[in-house]
Structures are given as C-alpha cells and as structure tokens.
Amino acid sequence: MGDDVSVGSVERLPEQRAGRREWTALGVLLLPVLLISVDATVLSFAVPHLSEGLAPSGNQLLWIVDIYSFMLAGLLVTMGTLGDRIGRRRLLLIGAVGFGFASAVAAYSTSPEMLIFARALLGFAGATLMPSTLSLLRNIFLDQRQRTLAIAIWATMFSVGSAAGPVIGGWLLEHFWWGSVFLINLPVMVVLLCLTPFLVPESRDPNPGRYDLMSAGLSLVAMLSAVYGIKTMASHGFSITALAALVAGIGFGVAFVRRQRVLTNPLLDLELFANRGFSVSVVTNMLTMIAFIGALFFITQYLQIVVGLSPMRAALVLVPGLTLAIFTGLFVVRLMRRFSIGPLIFAALMIVASGYALMTQLPTGSDAGGWLLAVGFTLVGAGVGASNTITNNTIMTAVRPEKAGAASAISETAYEVGAAMGTAILGTIVTTLYASGLANVPGVSDNLMHEARQTLGGALHVSGDLSGEVGSALKAAADVSFTSAVHTTSLIGALLVAYAATQALVVLRRRRRSVPAA
C-alpha cells in the first residue's frame, strides 16, 4: 500500500465491488470526521468557560469560535486540488501532524489572541483532512450502491461526533480546565497516523496539470476579506473598513472565477456547477449549516447559564437530537431508492425548520426550557442527518473519480462557509440583540454593565462578584435579554432553512433518484 495508485482511473474497473479491506479503510477515514465534529461541539460547550478563563471581548469570542471555520473555508478548495496532485493519503497524513500540533497550542493558550492564532492553525491543518477523506471514499467505493452507503456512513459520523462531543466535553469541563477539550484530538491523530499507511490506498488525479498558486492565493484572500467585512458590519454596523473588506473580497472572488475560466487546468472546475443536483446540494449544505451551527452557539449558553444546567446535563439535552441524526442519515438511503431527491430534501429541511420554530418559545430560567429545547433540537438533528446524506451523495456521484478531490473540497467549503457564517451572522445577531436589550441595572456601574453586555458569560461573572440583590437582578435581566435574543435568532434560522427547502424542491423536484433500485 506504500505505492501510489490512481484508483478509479486504470487499475480498477467501475463494476468492482469493495471488500473487507475497503470497508476497513472506511473505518480509518472516519477518524478525522469524528475528530472535527467532536471538536466543533466541544468548543461550543466551552464558550462560557472561555469567557471566564480568558475574559475575551464579545468580538474576540466570536473570532475564537469562527476563525477555525474561516481558515477551513478559505483553504479547502486549494487543499482539495492539492490532494488530487500530490496524493490524497499523503496530504491527509501531513494534515494529521499539523492538527495535533495546533491542538496542543490551543490547549495551553494564555490569552484570547493566542487562542485565536491557534484556532487559525487548526483551520489550516483541518483543511487538509476533510477533502482527503471524502475524495478517497469516492475512489475506494466504485459501486454506486456501496458508495452511497459509505457516504451515508461518512456523513453520519458528523452526527456521531456531535453526539459524543458534548458528553465528552461536559465530563472534561466538569473535571478539568477548558484547554482539555483540545487535548482529546491528540490520541485520535496518533491512531490515524499509525493505521492510514497500512489500510488506506493512495490515490491522485493521473493528469492533474499545473498547480496554480495565484488561484490558491485569490481564493483564500477573497474568502477571508468577504467574511471579515460581513462579520464586522454585523458586529459594529456600517464602516468604511468593513465595506472596503467586503468589496475587496467580492473583487478577488470575481478575479478568481475569471482566472478559472481561462486556465487549461483550473484550481476549481466551474463546469461542476452546471449540474443542478451538484450546485443546489452545495447551496443547501451551506444554508443548513448556517442555521445549525448558529443555533449551537446560543443553545449551549442558554442551557448552561439561563437554565443553569451543568456542562454534562446540558450535553445530555442535545444527545437525543444528535443521535437521531445518525439513524435518519442511514435510513434515508432506502428512501433515495424510491423518491426524487428534491422532495426528500424539502421534507428533511422542513423538519429542521419546525425544530427552530419551537425554539422561539423557550422560557426564561425554567427547567421546561431544557425539555422544549430537547424536542426542538431532536427535530433539527433528524432533518439535518437526512439532508446531509442526500446532498453529499448527490455531490459525489456528479463527478468523475479523478475529480473527487475538487468536488469534495467544494462540498466541504460549503459546510465550513456555512459554519463560519452561522457563528458570524446568527451568533452576531444574538450577541447584538442581547447587548442592546440588556438595560442598566440599578446599583451596577457603567463599566460593569459594559462588561456584562459583552457576553452572557461575562454577565454571569459580573453578577457573581456583586452583592446579593444587585447581582441577582443583573443575572435575571441578562437571562431575559438573552432569551429574547434567542427567540428572534431562532425565527431567522427557521426562515433560512425553509428557504433552502423550497429552493431544493423547486429546482430538483423532477430530478430522478441517484441510487439504483434494489
């Protein structure tokens, strides 16, 4: 297995079915997916602890959460096509080493700035992991029905990791400091580095052409500039700096697209978007993740601070929804053999929207809020699990095996852009509404009120340092303001998902099922 093999181009025939070795390789490739999904939910639960431990500002806290996704989004296309050229397994191993190192730096960060830098390194290394796993699957499983099941398992592993992350993170946060949530990455990376060379075959595009560094730079600068502009305007309102960043991002993006059209071997094959199933699935992934990750940003704070649950108990509230996503992600494979993908995506996302609609009714400081949120998030998990399987299978069946790296990179870019924008947009909305809705509390100085308005965790810290009645009044006011902000943000999330569902139904309602019938 040490030799390079262009899997899917010459050596293997399309009709070959995967055997025991290929399914074992799938198990190894699930490790990075498990790791990244665990990392995402673990950090969400660590937000209140980060707020107290490092005392970041509201803007710094958002950067800590989303710089990882920004770097991933900006580099995924570059890394996906790089894997097509140098070897997807080789890139996976390089990324595993980098991810382990960056995790250690993040765990022992001593300031918000240091943690932001470490998270950026994690994003850089993580960009090498995800496209490699999905593109390797595309080349290992050539039989369409087997590949659909393998992709369903791959997509479901996001839910497995999301379900395990809160439980692991809740236990760690109750027994150790917040940095321990990053150290759990290290043993997974060690296992991946030991098993991958022996079980996972190398694959690459046999005729990749010249690698264009200019395109790689344009894609990264365009993504970071545009997202920074949107994020800054959402946080602080209109400014010349934010507008300039947004315009620059759009300009670099246009230059990137134009360059791809004239290159003989483009970094991003724009012809992929001519396939309606591919393009709509990519957009659906992005919109779904905006709502999903944005919700996790405020759900974890609501459960731990407003309702008053411990990290472990808060994690258990989310586990039913995250676990159900595993079941629906696998069960929908059967439905894909019977129904068109447009109506299936519509049904799945309307379930998600109904879950967000329930969250608009969350009460303030009541145990009933935990139960209502558990039901709402269960609906969200069920719909997201099914939708992810359908869209990822549609994306990967639309491309030739040698272009799997580029296609998987686009798919992952949509995920990560959605994740980053979910925190940047919905996270900023809930933070801004919370700050504007928290009125001055008698007996609390202006300086302390300013600190309390930065984050809900900051308000909890300030209220704990004040005398009994004044501290209790500040805590109650912060809870009411944050819950009201959650109501509005949940409504926005519901409308966003409903739009994604309608778009999929209208564009793809006549598209035939993508999985052969039994």
Image: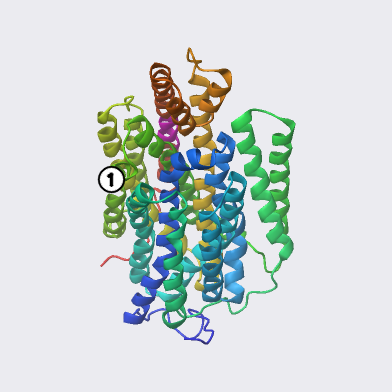
Q: For the residue carrying disc 1, how many other residues have a C-alpha within 10 Å: few (<14), some (14-19), or many (20+)?
A: some
Q: Identify which amino acid the numbered label 1 is placed on.
A: Leu
At which x and y percent is residue 165?
37, 53
Q: Determine the residue located farthest toward the top in the rendered image.
A: 442
Q: Is residue 239 above or below residue 184?
A: above
At which x and y percent is residue 29?
42, 70
Frontmost residue, 450 versus 395: 450
Q: Residue at the location (55% across, 45% down)? A: 64
Badge 1 marks a residue whose secondary structure is helix
Q: Is residue 288 visible?
A: no
Frontmost residue, 386 versus 37: 37
At which x and y percent is residue 203?
52, 78
Q: Residue at the location (42% across, 39% down)? A: 295
Quarter of the image that includes the C terminus: bottom left
Residue tagged 1: 316
Q: Is residue 107 above or below residue 232?
A: below
Q: Is residue 495 magenta?
A: yes
Q: Is residue 416 visible?
A: yes
Frontmost residue, 343 versus 512: 343
> What secondary structure do most residues of the magenta stretch adopt?
helix
Q: Residue at the location (31% across, 45% down)? A: 312
Q: Which residues are magenta?
A: 489-496
